[in-house]
Image: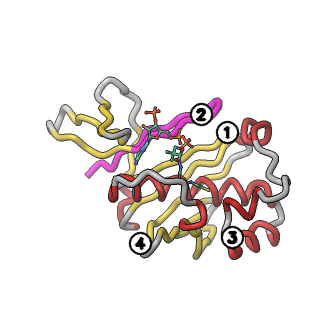
Amino acid sequence: MIGNDIIDLALARKESNWKRKGFLDKLFTPKEQVLISNSQNPETTLWNLWSRKEAAYKIYNRQTQIRAFIPLQLECFDIEEIDGIILGKVICYDTVYYTKTIITSDYIETNAVVNSRDFDNIKTIDTFDMIVKTDGIPNYFDSENKIWKPISKSHHGRFGRVVVLDK
Ligand SMILES: CC(C)(COP(=O)(O)OP(=O)(O)OC[C@H]1O[C@@H](n2cnc3c(N)ncnc32)[C@H](O)[C@@H]1OP(=O)(O)O)[C@@H](O)C(=O)NCCC(=O)NCCS
């Protein structure tokens, strides 16, 4: 399974005043707030954590069919940067998801998977006509192999991405 999230940093800056009273308490756990406040760039760290939580949530949503706003039940941990790519984990209730995040000056993009070996199998799709949603959750018809595959979609501002596990 796969989940993704992309954030247009210019739009995020325009849409959200993260310094507003209560904003961080509502969306980030105490441990995540420490990561944000200790960071050299708190704003980027905040959107980095947010995109991980959203990507992991999309898998949780597919697994459970539960739709809920549960930012404090999703917690990022074990974050490490290797060659510009940020790896980490997100726990949601008792399930751990693996995340990989890329940060550029324009956007932050996270892919989440259930098994870290699946990072090697993530592919971007650019044909949109074979996508059908069931209960709001999208799947893609792989016409070559004649099977439906779970995909994840995200769009924000100038950016959009559709990803599938190709295996
Ligand atoms: C549903 C939700 C994840 C959408 O995220 P968003 O940032 O508003 O928008 P995105 O563009 O990233 O995602 C929307 C796309 O996700 C896709 N999507 C929805 N559920 C999905 C799932 N379970 N798996 C994969 N893709 C999914 C939809 O197809 C949609 O694309 P479409 O409108 O083109 O069909 C979000 O609104 C939400 O409800 N979050 C609650 C979880 C939470 O607590 N988050 C807090 C983080 S701090």
Res. 13 image quadrant: top right
Res. 48 image quadrant: bottom right
Q: State left or right for residue 58 relative to residue 166.
A: right
Q: What residue is pinned by disc 1?
A: 8
The segment highlighted magenta reads: 152-167
How much space separates mark 1 and mark 3, taking CA atoms?
Answer: 21 Å
Q: Nearer the viewer, residue 103 or 66?
A: 66
Q: Position of residue 83 (x, y in %)?
A: 62, 63
Q: Nearer the viewer, residue 70 or 153?
A: 70
Q: Which label's residue is closer to the chain start, 4 or 3? A: 3
Local SS, label 1: strand
Local SS, label 2: strand
Q: Which label's residue is closer to the chain start, 1 or 4? A: 1
Residue displayed at 23% across by 34% down: 141
Eye-nearest disc, 1 or 3: 3
Question: What secondary structure characterizes most of the magenta part?
Answer: strand
Q: What residue is pinned by disc 3?
A: 32
